[in-house]
Amino acid sequence: MGRSRTLLLAVDGLDEHDLETLRHAAGNTGGAGATGGAGANGAAGPARPADGDTRFPALARTVLTGMTELRIRPGGPSEPAPVLASLVTGASVARTGVATAEPFLVDRPESRSTWYASSMAAPTLFTQAREAGLVTAALQWPATAGAEIDLCLPLVEDLHRYRNRWEMAVATSSPRMITEHLACRREAGVQLSQVPPDDLVAEIAAEALGHGHIDLLAARLTGLAIVRRTLGPGTAQARRALLDTADALEQILTAFSPLAEDRVLLVPGRPVIPTALLVHPNTALAAHGLLRTEENHLRDFDALVWPDGPRGVVHVRREVDAAVREGVLHALSTLSEGGPANGVGTHDRLSLRPVDDGVEASEETDVIAVLEGGPGTVFGLSATNRSLVEGDDPYYAGPRTVSDPSALAVVLARGPGLPERTVEGSWADLGVTLAQAFGLSLPGATAAGMGAPAAAPA
């Protein structure tokens, strides 16, 4: 019996209902792989089901059958990048260094915390596994660019720094990834701007699994969530995106071919729901003189609410005193607790929650609170737009859907060291449990593991 392997699959926008749909969806999704149905070495990808076949064999057999449901409690991060950072560190979102879905870019436009490993404030499972002599791979996983990962393909989106996608991919991927999987594609004339990222991830994952033993392969698929957020969940494009996601999952799972001693985890996010309210909390800070604008642009700030989908993360500059911090909380409370804010009254779906573990959340700021909305709330960055915009407003231009932080998420898992019965926990708890299954510890973890008593939300 060989050394056990672990496949960690994260699928943005997938939920329990999708898993049922995949059991009964039409098997033939048509099309071919990212580079014309064959890898750079000329080998064809795995065969797709024929017309009329209503099953996804690998999914039904490997993922949907005989796996344990691990329930992720409401609370904590709900956007993919902070979720996955919390998962691989076992730390609360305030202590990972990746506190929001979009990078916090106020004074340092070169900083891209969502993509670069240098932003991570806690050791990751990848680091600990590699130090233990294990082979690791991370594909489209947030905050991995520059990490000590054997096969790393971050798929960074940082065109402010790089001239084109090939330059960006080569500069941010690991040397082994370039040598074994990217160089041949570049020489073959593949245009990365024309390749769907999920297709590339699935194709390279299948190739890598066929080339040799990988102890931990973490792959993230993003296409489904992008389509659902921009176009809505009920569109023809969204239905196609679900089938494309199933096809990518099947390709990876077929290549992995798990044995009894292997681990498989399928990590969806929170369910997405239609947007009902757009909130611009920085208008309240601007009205109280806590940030300054120049025309429609931010000039400087003492405090700033950075949007994170259904939440707003309240940053303050580290040098401001206690009085200013209290003033920030007061200004934002006008949105959620009483009194007008920039001419607009409060909204009963908003609440302000102070936090005490957000010190040094970014290079220049502390996080002192989180502004939370009810289901369907989206937070924006603008300090000059109207504070509150209902989702059916004809001028609304935000995402069609948003993750629901009040909903449970269900992770499917199987393999040695993972729970064999349904237990609950946080994303950080899941990370601790996964590390324990490897016989590893996460030094920066703030969680105890799945099934442990719930900690206060961070």
Image (cartoon, rainbow, N blue to C red):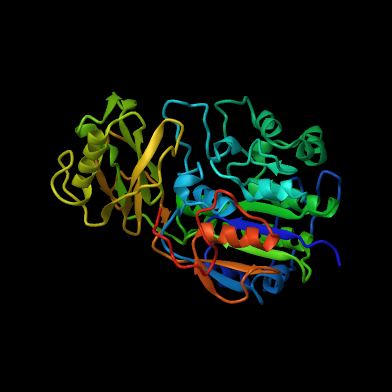
Quarter of the image holding residue 286? top left
Q: Position of residue 376 (x, y in %)?
A: 35, 57
Of residues 291 and 120, which is closer to you in this image? Answer: 120
The residue located at (15%, 40%) in the rendering is: 343
Residue 284 shows in this picture: no
Q: Position of residue 70 (x, y in %)?
A: 55, 69
On screen, 425 above or below 306? below
On screen, 161 above or below 208? above
Of residues 344 and 392, which is closer to you in this image? Answer: 344
Q: Position of residue 327 (x, y in %)?
A: 21, 37
In the displayed structure image, the side of residue 228 where residue 283 appears, left or right: left
Residue 189 shows in this picture: yes
Q: Position of residue 316 (x, y in %)?
A: 34, 35
The residue located at (64%, 63%) in the rendering is: 265
The residue located at (40%, 43%) in the rendering is: 358
Of residues 384 and 286, which is closer to you in this image? Answer: 286
Quarter of the image holding residue 120? top right
On screen, 94 above or below 237? above
On screen, 193 above or below 73? above
Of residues 177 and 225, which is closer to you in this image? Answer: 177
Name, please, the residue furthest toward the left: 339
